[in-house]
Image (tube, rainbow, N blue to C red):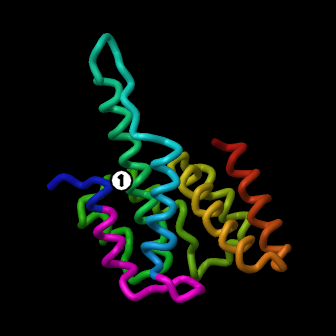
Amino acid sequence: MIVDAETAAEFSQIAHKGQTRWDGSDYFENHVQQIVDMMREDLGPRDIVDDGETVMGAQVDVVLDRFYQVAYLHDVIEDTQYTREDLYRAGFTPMVVQAVEAISKISDSREDYWEYIGRVKVNSIATVVKVYDIQNNLQDIMDNYPEKTDKIKKYETALSILMAAV
């Protein structure tokens, strides 16, 4: 079984079924898919030509696919009943599962937000996905709750920290 971004999208849709955003809209379509769409627009896929062949382009697409898998799965462990073991059973690679774990807040932990951001930035895939996650959340807050200046400032600071790590 080949596990790719399409597989991750299907897994995420099942995991987030029935979840909604603050405005009642579908969580998957209005957050998870938006993040992947933002990443695809910014990151690729790209055809990198090496001596007239797209060998490098194929390798880049495989790497990008892993980033998209993590983006689709980024809230699965944190916000659903699914676990890392479920991701492994579904065939996701250790690289993908470890990045999903790195980006997942631990609900029963005493880890504060800044410790969490520090943990995220250790994993390069999680860092990139978290940048897009924060950008999506920040845009929602700025569009709908501009008075939440503390939260906006917190997200802007987190973005600065993560961008410095990319």
Q: Which amino acid does label 1 sit on?
A: Pro
23, above or below 61, in the image? below
Q: In this view, does 144 lie to the left or right of 147?
A: left
**SS type, badge 1:** helix
Q: Mark 1 points at which residue?
A: 94
Magenta residues? 8-25
Instruction: Give the residue at x 49% y 85%.
Output: 20
Residue found at the far left of this picture? 1
Q: Which of 86 and 159 is in front in this view?
A: 159
Question: Does 102 sit left or right of 96 as displayed?
Answer: right
How far from the left and from the top, in percent, is residue 29?
43, 73
Q: Which residue is drawn at 48% across and 80% down?
A: 79
Q: Give the residue at x 72% y 55%.
A: 159
Task: Left or right? Give the position of 42 relative to 72.
Answer: right
Q: Nearer the viewer, residue 109 or 56?
A: 56
Q: Find out whether residue 166 is within the magenta segment.
A: no
Please give the name of the residue rendered at 40% of the width and 80% of the height, measured from the top-left corner: 16
Q: How many marks?
A: 1
How many other residues sit within 10 Å of disc 1, few (<14), some (14-19) or many (≥20)? few
**Quadrant of res 141:** bottom right
